[in-house]
Image (tube, coloured by chain):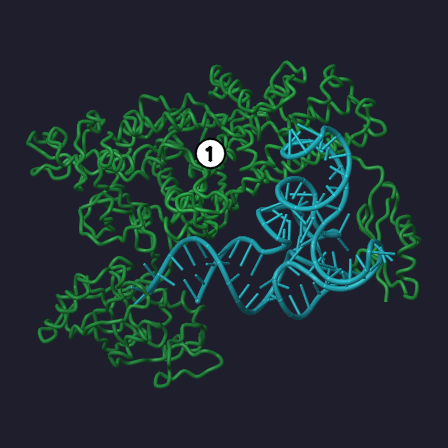
Chain colours: A green, B cyan
Amino acid sequence: MEERYDPIAIELAWQKSWNDSNKFSVSEQSEKEKFYLLEMFPYPSGRIHMGHVRNYSIGDVVARFKRLQGFNVLHPMGWDAFGMPAENAAIQHGIHPAKWTVDNIANMRIQLKRMGLSYDWDREFATCDVDYYKWEQQIFLKMFEKGLAYKKSSTVNWCPECQTVLANEQVEDDACWRCSTPVIDKELDQWFFKITEYAEELLDYTDKLPGWPESVLTMQRNWIGRSIGCEIEFPLENTLEKIKVFTTRQDTLYGATFMSLAPEHPKALELTTDDCRADVEAFIAKVRSQDKKKRTSEDYEKEGVFTGAYCINPVTRRKMPIFLANFVLMDYGTGAVMAVPTHDQRDFEFANKYDLDMVVVIQPKDQLLDPKSMTEAWTGGGLMINSDRFDGQENEAAKEGIADYLATEGIGDKTVNYRIRDWGVSRQRYWGNPIPVMYCDQCGVVPVPEKDLPVVLPTDVEFTGEGGSPLEKHKEFYSVTCPQCGQAARRETDTFDTFVESSWYFARYACPDFASGPIDRAAAEYWLPVDQYIGGVEHAVMHLLYARFFTKVMRDLGLMNVDEPFTNLLTQGMVCKETQSCAEHGWLYPEEVVDGKCVKCDQPATIGRTEKMSKSKMNVVDPDHLIAKYGADTARLFSLFAAPPEKDLEWNEQSVEGCYRFLNRVWRAVYDSHALISSHPEVETEGEARKLRRITHRTIKKVTEDIDGRFHFNTAISAVMELVNAIYVFEAKDKYPGALCEALETVVKLLAPFVPHITEELWLSMGNTSDLETVGWPTYDEKALVEDENLIVIQVNGKVRAKIMVSATADKATVEAAVLADEIIVRQIADKTVRKVIVVPGKLVNVVVG
RNA sequence: GCCGAAGUGGUGGAACUGGUAGACACGCACGCUUGAGGGGCGUGUGACUUAACCGUCGUGCGAGUUCGAUUCUCGCCUUCGGCACCA
């Protein structure tokens, strides 16, 4: 055995061995129970970053732990390989996106292998492989057939920088989620997936995912945004037509005194009277010219215009003027709102501005509302008044009855409305999966026949950087003949949002080579769902919601048989580091600051706030350097030890040093006792050996419980550190080599999922022949845990005053007597009366005096 | 405004169903080892007070429940994340 720990040499040797033997390759042919562990696959940007290191270290601990526990573990890796950066590289550096992507993947694969992650590399694929994306095209065709994919013209979120459309989820603070350019409105013909059809199921199942963090479920519930209410029809005055509104406040129907329509409402111009037409048209034009995002922000002034038309409140028969209002949205509910100024703040402001009627219909308990003196709408609860048969009822309780009444009268129906919109998937980009349809003057939208799939993305395209997709200029691609009528037709040049690929890749990992469909049912049956999914919380809504949606769609298409893709979800926190900047040169990389000064100008550098590592803030650390300096085991250990997985991790070089030091300490502990333990002496159970064994087995218990399901890797590691400390101070090494050997072997076994290289190496050097995976995860001996004596904490009136050792077999009375006889306690209670003595067996005694 | 998460030493963090607050680690100090440096090994390290023991205070703030509260309840403050003119 080498005296010195040489991480690089050890790691390269073990990685070669794992690679050569396809060590972590799995199949369905196994006696063992399956466990599917998945980490979110990376975009091949070129280099891994600390976020990847953390994500994949966490995943690898779970994968290796489950494997050691005897599970058949599927742990795959691949590449989310379509996307804009590849195209930007083509424009900026003249490298073809395909080459750029392939090169990046090759590089990142080396980096991941260098981390010693236990992937089944046989299952690796990139989403830009034709063998992957062609099946996505097939899924699309089936969705199209079922009406789950459809085309419509709509105002879309357009990013002028990326020259493409964004889904609502991809807009953050009115800006592109990727490049932060402000998003503008654009009217475009787009493909949509009908995620709204699954809104209810997606929402209902948020209650059936106990393995998900509550915060993620809440975000998804908010995003789906279900509201239960009524659709109510208001007849127009003088015609037979009606206008339908959606409301969640049918309890205020008797107070509805006017109506507000969205400016885009189809009936807006139709019902406008001649003398109001000029004003209405001007208003519509004005609203159209305004930015939609600005217009729909809360502080924007409420404005409207009278149409000259009236409708009738169906329960009060009151004549209600119809307005157009800028705050009414066409794409929520019905685009029409019954206005109740007394009980809705927006309507209240609007009514004041245009001097409209107000009627109070809900009277709160502790004040009397009068429209003349109200300064704001009353949106709380109370008793209903001015509401005919419902007078005197509690408004919340009456909602159900009102809905029923409206239904029987044929005025309205109970309905459910969702905030979520259909998912726009068209992107005006080249480096993506072509949407397999064409346009024929005769036949309209024609799906590419399944037998003609795949629609292969051509590689001979030109990148001008002038915007628009190069596919639009690629005649061989877009010029096609219609399969239905044989006439010339034009192929769709838009490609799919790359979130489509990541919506089903987890299922393809079960059968990456399956050649007769997207998913091999038998393989999917065995492996799915994913037992544990791990990734960043930034995907809480987008990716995770789309993947859930796709799973349900694939189920309904008969492709597989699961309702939810991910049984358990772990969302890990970000990797952060302090930012540094200099007055002259702005943000600085860590290596550009030496002795607190900017290397470019020698001015002192300012330390800014700690933020998520990002290239733009330059507060990044390159994992390659870390691994080259300390090895992969140290890099892994640091990212697991410094914080629990779900919290943010603050980068600290000194803490990395500490982890490296610990591994050296472990190495030395084994090295120092090498001669003593090489014969694997029998474990002694008496005297000091018994004490060491107690610590050894207690550690096994703690580490097992900390990893399994709790993911408290930091405390698991600290428990092993304590065991190592105990070995160092264990003085009877020569006397009890058996107990020592057991302790050292336990350290190695328990650390195996965290730092796989050093542990395999130490295991071998201890004279073992089979590898750690064959040996399996250690179990603890209950008998070894038994304490002879317990430390009893003694409190007087809840304050700790003394501690004594008491035999573990002592009964309550004995303990109490021992406590009351204790010198310190006698002094503490000398001049007081003992009122009560509380004994917590084996732990604590509280003497209450007064 | 609504919803969710969090607030503990100089620092990262621990304390699982109410029972020794600060495990483990970083940093710092001291000692041993070494020719020295590095490294290693060990001891100490919440604050105040003290020579030391003792003592007092202490988990964002304020109340409450309890023999006992970082943990439970109520009210507030701060930070982060999500939603927000959604009828």
Query: A546 or A311, which lies in front?
Result: A546
Instruction: Where is residue B75? Give x, y as percent.
Output: 56, 69
Quarter-wise, where is residue B37 in the image? top right
Residue A258's image quarter? Answer: bottom left
Answer with left or right where residue A692 lies relative to residue A504: right
* Residue lying at 39% horizontally and 32% vertically, measured from the top left: A47
Q: Secondary structure at mark 1?
A: helix
**Residue positioned most to the bottom:** A372
Corner quadrant of residue A395? bottom left
Disc 1 packing (10 Å; few <14; some 14–19; many ≥20):
many
Residue annotated with mark 1: A623
**As drawn, B14 above or below A512:** below
Residue A28 higher or lower than A567, as above or below:
above
Could you say which is closer to the camera, residue A404 or residue A659? Answer: A659
Please state if A112 lies on the left or on the right of A844 as rendered.
Answer: left
Coordinates of residue A675 in the picture (x, y in percent)? 74, 17
Q: Is residue A605 left or right of residue A694?
A: left
- Quarter placement of the C terminus of chain A: bottom right
Q: Residue at x 48, y 35 (%)?
A: A53
Q: Position of residue A508 (x, y in %)?
A: 37, 28
The chain containing the residue under callout 1 comes to A
Q: Name the foreground residue: A826 vs A379.
A: A826
Asked if residue A226 shows in the view, the reply is: no
The amino acid at mark 1 is Pro
Whether residue A579 is visible to the viewer of this picture, yes or no, is yes
